[in-house]
Image (spheres, helix red, strand yellow):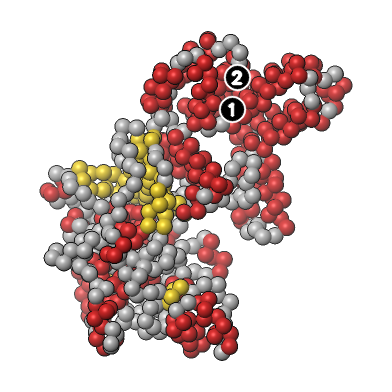
Amino acid sequence: MILSLVNSRKENTDIKIVCEDTAEYQNKEKITFVDLFAGAGGFSEGFLQAEHGNKYYDFLLGSDINDNCELTHLARYNHQLGLDAEFLRQDITEPDFLTNLIKKLKGQKVDVVCGGPPCQSFSLAGKRKKFDKKDDLFAHYLNVIRILRPKYFVMENVKGILTKEGGNIKEMILQEIKSIVDLKEFNQLLFFLAKLRKQEKEKPFTLDCFNLRMQFENANDKDLEKLREDYIINIENKFRVLTPKIADYKTSKTDININTIRHGFNLLKRSKELAYVRKKVILEKSHSDLDNDFFAEKFDNFLTSIESDSIIEQVNEAFKNLKPSKIYQNEVTEIISALEIYNYSFEECIQSLKPFVANAKMETEFEEILTHIRLYNIDQPFIALASNYGVPQNRERVLFIGCRKDQKLIKVVPPTVTDKDKVTVFEALYDLDFVGNDDEKFNYETIDLKSRYNGTTEKMKALIKKRTIDGKPDENKGFTYAEWSQKGRLNGRFSKSKNPFYVRNFDELNNSLTHIVAPLHNHKTSKQNDDVIKRLEVILTTGDYDLAKKELKKIGLDSEKRNYNVLKPESQSPTVMTIPDDYIYFSSPRALTVREMARLQSFDDSFVFQGKRSTGGNKRKFEVPNSH
């Protein structure tokens, strides 16, 4: 074994690798992509494997806030495959993120952006219960899309996002995507609104507000601040004229409702300052780990109170309390509508303008302009089940696919395998079953199915099928899932790639003599004592953790652990998370190795998870172990 490691390292050191496209690839169409919230690189791997006809994907840049992710990225794509893909390790919410991103792209056009900004903490305006650092990520992701203008973008999320708050969160996401405007065409809309304003007799003030609000869309940060302030001043002036009509002088100076309205305007004019306060408080909340305590709710209530929608809600409430005479109700309604328009998304503005447009009989012109203005079209999101695409895992993810207006609309990605031909856990893992307790292997070993599965050998062998790269059965030209994993699913473009290697940190990465070079990595089992092994045996024999709990309690081996998933060899695994100890191997009482978890997610064996072996406790919030 030592000799093979030495030879593998020598081979890697001798190769001077730069991925120069062969003549075959120079004649193909290159589609560039950027991977945000990249994690270890699952999206990136998928794109690099996906060649079709005369097209292939070219990786420009990955981004994540985690240093293990950066280490894995640099080792895989730069050192091993020889790409010159960049990595930006920075929080997407930081003010100079976009500047740094554009600098690293060096003027290259981006065709596709992919990524999964967490939206779990989303809530509808005024109803947010939990504020954390993830709140802003979706908006910042869309801002990157707005600036880069890719042909397509893919946004991944958990299935629960579709039904959250009765489906309203999904609609809000779609609305925000449709609100990305083509700034190059935007003046068309402003000219149209000016024309519409001339025809409006009943609500000219409201249309003025729409016009002002629409100007937010194509303003830079500095201009936007001034536009927002001017917008509120416009409403404030209308209220100043209204005040003496609905309240006497003394009331106007002392009444809590009048004060609430005036001070609400003051707060709305300081949107930039409040955004800064909001970010600082959320960071402090995260830093001090405020959750499930007496502090969290108070902090959240404060954060809710400085949101623009909450301020507007308070102003609205104050108007109701004043109970103005019916004679002035129209003016009050106009002020409240103007405040709501201030908070509208682009798409909400468009929908609210339609009655004015219909009244002026200008619908055809309006719809024509909108086809030019909306930068992205999107159908309903769809649920992608991983096992439908040759992955031995029943992982469901929601995909929102935004298609630039000059590109074909993508509604679904058709499955590549039928239900009866799905890859099973057995065929994904059987060839790796040569590790014991507290064991690590760097080379493949031959598995004797006959001695291991005596009596069921033929049944187990029948689970192994030859397949094409996307999982379709093909007895003539195909390879088994295990063979694909060992030989790699990347194509001829990377025929000169280095052997897989492992490093613990950036210093080791930059010194090839410290690389652990071997055919197999991340195949290490944890050390488990006799009690744990016995517990796993009971759960494995029972086939289900919940059913085994009674027996475990009886023999004194019950556990506080919330979940154990027993893998079934003839079916697919449940969604694979980050902790190998949550899973029990299908034929022996042990947890999975990181390599086995990677197999269940269709990572090739040549893809090595770099960095620290594991992290625990509170560190899990800040570090991604190589079991990610």
227 relative to 521 in the view: left or right: right
Visible in this render: residue 173? Answer: yes
Residue 588's x, y, as percent? 39, 83
Q: Which residue is most to the right?
A: 250
The picture quadrant where one finds residue 474 is bottom left
Q: Secondary structure at mark 1?
A: helix
Residue 510's x, y, as percent? 33, 62
Give the numbered dot on residue 407.
Answer: none
| Residue type for callout 1 | Ile
Q: Name the residue carrying label 1.
A: 341
Quadrant location of the C terminus in the rendered image: bottom left
Disc 1 crowd rating (10 Å Cα; few below 14, some 14-19, many 20+) is many
At x 27%, y 79%, the residue is 459
Residue 327's x, y, as percent? 75, 16
Q: Secondary structure at mark 2?
A: helix
Q: Name the residue carrying label 2.
A: 206
